[in-house]
Amino acid sequence: MSDQILPIVDIDLQLSGQAPEEIMAYALSKFKNIAISFSGAEDVVLIDMAHKISPGKVQIFSLDTGRLHPETYRFFEKVRDHYSVKIDIVFPDTMALNNLVREKGLFSFYKDDHKECCGIRKIGPLRSKLLTLDAWITGQRRDQSPGTRSAIPVIQDDMAFSRPQEKLVKFNPLANWTSQQVWAYIRQNNLPYNELHDKGFVSIGCEPCTRPTGPGQHEREGRWWWEEATAKECGLHEVNTKK
Amino acid sequence: MKITFVKKIQLDGNFCKKCKEVQDKINAADQNQFIDQVIIADERDPSSPGMVLAALYSADRAPFFIVEKEGRSPEVYTIYFKFVKEVLGQKITEEDQLKEILNDNPDLNFL
């Protein structure tokens, strides 16, 4: 990590009024051991922004859960070729996955919920990757999850994935952008995009857990639609915790 | 080492669900002996000690633990199982850790 101690809350206040490109530039200037988490969807804009700032020098990683759409795998390759970048594809722990599938089958998420499967196929590999980094960049936006009260800051101290006694900084440059703004950027800059978007998919995840959404539906409705939407109310209200 | 456990009281006057769950786990594992103080973050009162600590340490979810060691900056843990593993040095399953991380960070669904 940078030897500078970052007053995260103050920097968030400062950066939250800036454009995603400026936030990206700040992140890349402050950290050498930093990587973009690329999901194979519209977060390709992060790669484009980073490429314009520092061509070919930014680490990129993607989580291959083993259940992605063929279109998403093709898109990884398209992005790799388009930007001439390496993408570090991260895989689930074989033993954990083998245990899950042997005990519960390949579609346990329809009977239980998606969390056990996501934990093994996505969160475990993500944690392994993040343990090697000082900072990471995601395409998370506030408008992706309207039901949760905790706002997504543009920079945060990632307490979930940090190494013991160390800090991990997480940047969300697109936090304040809407889906429309992201797509305007993609169109205006003629970026490659996942062909699933042309088939009605807004939010793209694993094949069994993602479906196209109709007009007026929120993108969240295209994911885990069989689960009841339950509020998670253990966040501390932002308005009360700001300095 | 000093360990502070911060629990949240919601606007309706009840402890948050996760705070109750974590307290139950602490009780079941006989871990109260390691906790030096319990502080309340009362959502009805932004100046309550726990709310002040949440702001001070940028803790955006409850409950959380503050671990102070001599000569070191305080460490904040918002993931109970991470706290148990790294601070108390106790064994926990990978599955429990991953589930808790996902439960507490629904935004990770969109990675």
Image (cartoon, coloured by chain):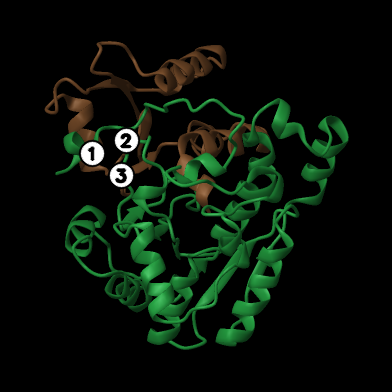
Chain colours: A green, B brown
Name the residue tied to disc 2: A149
Q: Which mark is residue B79?
A: none
Percent position of residue A153, x then y:
30, 52
Residue type, mark 1 in image: Glu
| Same subunit, tags 2 and 3 | yes
Vertical arrangement, residue A28 with respect to residue B92, above or below: below
Q: Residue at x 60, y 37 (%)?
A: A224
Q: Please give the chain letter of the residue carrying mark 1.
A: A
Residue type, mark 3 in image: Ala
Q: Which mark is residue A238?
A: 1
Give the CA separation, mark 2 to mark 3. Answer: 6 Å
Name the residue tied to disc 3: A151
Q: Nearer the viewer, residue A74 or A34?
A: A74
Left or right: where A20 falls relative to A209: left
Q: Nearer the viewer, residue B69 or A165?
A: A165
Q: Please give the chain letter of the residue carrying mark 3.
A: A
Give neighbour class at mark 2: few <14, some 14-19, many 20+ (Cα, 10 Å): some
